Image (cartoon, rainbow, N blue to C red):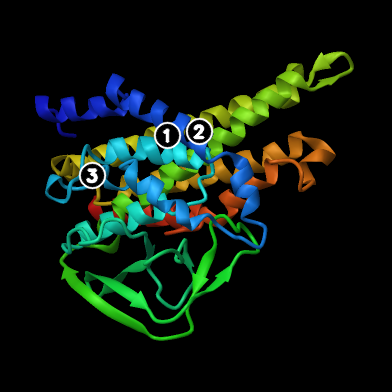
Amino acid sequence: MTTSPSALAAWDDLVPGAERQELADTARRHFAEQFPLTGVRECFGAGGRPLDRWVEIVEAGYPVIGLPESAGGIGGLTDLVAVVEESGRALLPLPLAATAAGRHTLIRGGLGVPAETDRSTALTTDPAAGVLDGAGAATVVTVAVVDDATTRVAEVTPAGAPELVTHVDPSRPVARWSGSIAEGRAQTVDATIDHVLAPARTIFAADLVGIAAGALQRSVDHALAREQFGRPIGAFQAVKHRLADHYVLVERARSLTRAAAVVVDHPELDTDWAPGVLALLAKAAAAEAALRITATHVQLLGAMGVTFEADAHLYFRRAEQTASVLGSTAECQIRAVRLMGTRR
């Protein structure tokens, strides 16, 4: 383990300072006021997602957080994950997490930032499979694939309009293209796929932490307000112990996500770990937390929880749609174990 003063100072970012906390609080208020859950519900209608509002996200400056200063970026990945967590909590129906993941993968792959930073971006490791959040105004897709012992990263533009698969979460649909794909910029880097995808996995982990935290808060609020036998249901051990366990799941995932972001922001710390292993652990923990907590949220509401009118299914859908991106919990854990074994 690195013990130099500079390395120890870098780990201070595990605890957000006043400026980062203010950034997160501002983002939370913005998303809650401008993108309430009523907007997520509207995605189930004929109008679909409010992609015309992407410009509001761009103008707020969220997509450039963590990018290089030469591209107009500010802060680091630790700042970005704080904002993405809040977008996950709000179930933002716009491709902020996917765009950030795609752009940071381009940077990791040596291609730099796209010239048009107002465009939304998506990310995939399998061009033939569906692409999460792959449909939007002027969308391009970042593709990262294993190329022998190296990794090839490319920016591609699919031809024609995609087919949207919206049966799970219409506010974050999967896009599929049946036409050709035109490859633009491309680069092969001498790095493992896990090293290249570390920022992207960290970003999606932050998104899942936000989903889990939002569902947990709603579960706690319900447990305090709902009464059975003259007592709040939160007073019963079966409920309060499960919610306490879920709080631990959120904090574990949040801590791992921040640690993964610190390592990306401070490459010198990567010598302590197999490249990309912290991002794998963060993604695994965040996916587990989101899936378990959103399921509990539905169950805690009883019969009301399985109705369309309750908001619980919105969190459940978002977690189910996102948890497997760049690897499920089991897949990420297995890859992390193998990486650490190779390192030893």
Image location (x, y in percent) of residue 2: 15, 33
> Relative to 60, is 75 on the left or the right?
left
Image location (x, y in percent) of residue 53: 46, 51
Image location (x, y in percent) of residue 204: 42, 49
Image location (x, y in percent) of residue 37: 61, 41
Q: Amino acid at mark 1?
A: Arg
Answer yes or no: do the residues labelled 3 and 1 have beta carbons within 8 Å?
no
Answer yes or no: do the residues labelled 1 and 2 have beta carbons within 8 Å?
yes
Residue drawn at x 40%, y 75% as measured from the top left: 127
Q: Is residue 287 above or below residue 128?
A: above
Q: Amino acid at mark 3?
A: Val
Q: Which type of secondary structure does the marked residue at label 2 adopt?
A: helix
> Relative to 30, is 157 on the left or the right?
left
Residue drawn at x 50%, y 33% as measured from the top left: 250
What's the distance in space between the residues labelled 3 and 1, CA to CA?
A: 15 Å
Residue drawn at x 40%, y 46% as measured from the top left: 56
Q: Amino acid at mark 2?
A: Val
What's the distance in space between the residues labelled 1 and 2, CA to CA?
A: 6 Å
In this view, the residue in front, 9 or 203, is 203
Q: Identify the residue at the far right of this view.
A: 229
Crowd tier of the residue under label 1, counting other residues whose Cα lies within 10 Å: few below 14, some 14–19, many 20 or above: many
| Label at residue 264 | 3
Residue drawn at x 46%, y 48% as measured from the top left: 284
**Circle 2 is placed at which residue position?**
250
Q: Earlier in the sequence, mark 2 or mark 3?
A: 2
Q: Which type of secondary structure does the marked residue at label 3 adopt?
A: helix
Q: Which type of secondary structure does the marked residue at label 1 adopt?
A: helix
Q: Tell me if I can see residue 4 in this picture.
A: no
In this view, the residue in front, 305 or 32, is 32
**Circle 1 is placed at which residue position?**
254
